[in-house]
Image (spheres, helix red, strand yellow):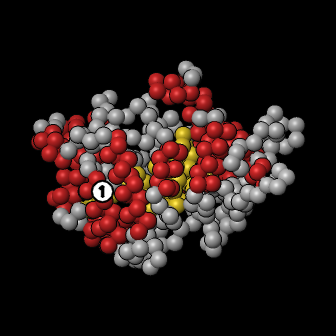
Amino acid sequence: MDPVKDAEARNGGQPGGRSGDPVRGTARGTAPVPLSVLDLATVGAGRTATDALRTSVEIARLAESRGYHRLWVAEHHSMPGVASSSPAVILAHLAAHTASIRLGSGGVMLPNHAPLVIAEQFGTLEALAPGRVDLGLGRAPGTDGATAAALRRTDRPHEAADEFPRQLAELIRFLDDDFPDGHPYARIHAVPGPVQGRVPGGAQAANRPPVWLLGSSGFSAQLAGSLGLPFAFAHHFSAANTLPALELYRSSFRPSEVLDEPYALIGVSALAADEEREAHRQVMTGALSMLRLRTGRPGLVPTPEEAEEYERGMGELERDFVRGWLANVVYGTPGQVRDGLDALAGRTGADELMITSQSHGARARLRSYGLIADAYGLPSDTSS
C-alpha cells in the first residue's frame, strides 16, 4: 500500500471552493485574510492549570464574539508552563462553552498516538460540535526525546516520526471507514463514525473533521501539497523556514476533493497593548520563558516584573537570543500590530493568520485579542 496515494484526496470527501467550505475562512473587517487564534493554555507564575484552562474558555468566547475564524490548541508534554497535554479533552470543554467558532488541534502529534484512538477522539468531538472541528496533525513529539519515548513506549521515537505518511493514511482510512476488503483493519470501525450510518436503522452525519498537516520545515509542506490538504506552518517559532516551506507546499500542490488550490495558514506570535512599552513588558515574559526552555530550564511563564528584572542582568548571549526571538514577534500598539500583520500576510501570501499571544496573565492576552479585532474593525458579535 502506497501511503501517499492511499491518503490522496480523501480528507472528508467535501468539495473544494469557498461556499460552505470546511477549510477556507473569510476575511472580516479590514483584515487582509481570515484571523484565527492559537491558544497554548500557558500557566503563569503564581497561577494554576485550572486558571490557565479557564482563561482558554475566556479566549475562545472572545474570539467567537469578535469574528476570529477558528481557535486551535496544541499538544505539549512535560512542560510546566503549558497545560495543553490533551487537546481532545480541552476541545471538548471549549465546544461546550462556544457555539459557532471552529475548534481544532494545532496540533495532535500523530506519532504519539494510535491512529484509531485519534479517529475515535475526533469523531467524538465532531459529534459534540458538528461541523466545527479541525484535525491538525504534526509529526514532531511536542516534547523532548525522553518524554517522547515514554509516550510511545519505545526507545526509537524518531522511527515513529518517520512512519508519519503510513500513520496518516491509516488515520484517514479510519475516519472514512473504508479499509479495503481483506485489510487487517477492514472490520474495525472508529466510533462515532461513518459505520453508524450503514448499520440497520443507522443515521450518521456525512461530514467529519478536515485533516490539516502542520509543520516547521519542508517535510509536511511537501506531503500536504502532494495530498491536496491544507497546510499550517509554525512561523512563530520557525520563521526562517516560512517562505521556503510555503513555496514547497505550493509547488507540490495537487488538486484534490478537499481543495482545488493551496490553502496555507501560518501561526504568528503577536501582542497588542495600549502602549508600546506595555506590549514590550508583556512579550518579554514569553521571551524569557522560551529562553529558559531552550536552555533546559522549563518553568512557569514569569511575571512582567520578573522578566524586567531578568532582562536588566542578561548576558550578551541571552540578549542575542531574546533579540532574535522578538524579531519574529509582532507587538506594539494596535496600529503597529495591524501594520506588522498586514506586512507578514503580504510577504508570505498566507491565506490565514493564526495569532498566538504569549504573556503571563489572562488580562493582557484577552486585551490583545480585543485590540487586534478593533484595529481591523472585526464585528463585535458573529451575527454582524
Residue at the farthest bottom position: 384
Can residue 9 be seen in the rendering of this structure? no
Q: Amino acid at mark 1?
A: Arg
Q: Left or right: 84 with respect to 169?
A: left
Residue 198, position as x, y percentages in the image: 82, 53
Q: Crowdedness of circle 1 by 10 Å Cα count: few (<14), some, many (20+)?
A: many
Judged left or right of residue 118, residue 27 is left
Q: Quadrant of the N terminus?
A: top right
Residue 380's spot in the image, x, y percent?
37, 74
Image quarter for residue 29?
Answer: bottom left
Q: Which quadrant of the rendered structure holds the C terminus?
A: bottom left
Q: Position of residue 255 (x, y in %)?
A: 70, 62
- Position of residue 315 relative to residue 93, above or below, is above
- Residue corresponding to mark 1: 365
- Residue, x 60% and y 44% (percent of image)? 121
Of residue 244 and residue 130, the one placed in the foreground of this image is: 130
Compared with 206, 138 (above or below) is: above
Give the quarter of the image for residue 132.
bottom right
Residue at x-position 52% and y-position 37%: 140
Q: Is residue 50 above or below residue 39?
A: above
x then y, percent, for residue 377: 36, 77
Tell me the element at label 1.
helix
Kindly identify the residue that appears in the image at 41 percent across and 58 percent down: 60
Q: Residue at x 29, y 30 (%)?
A: 297
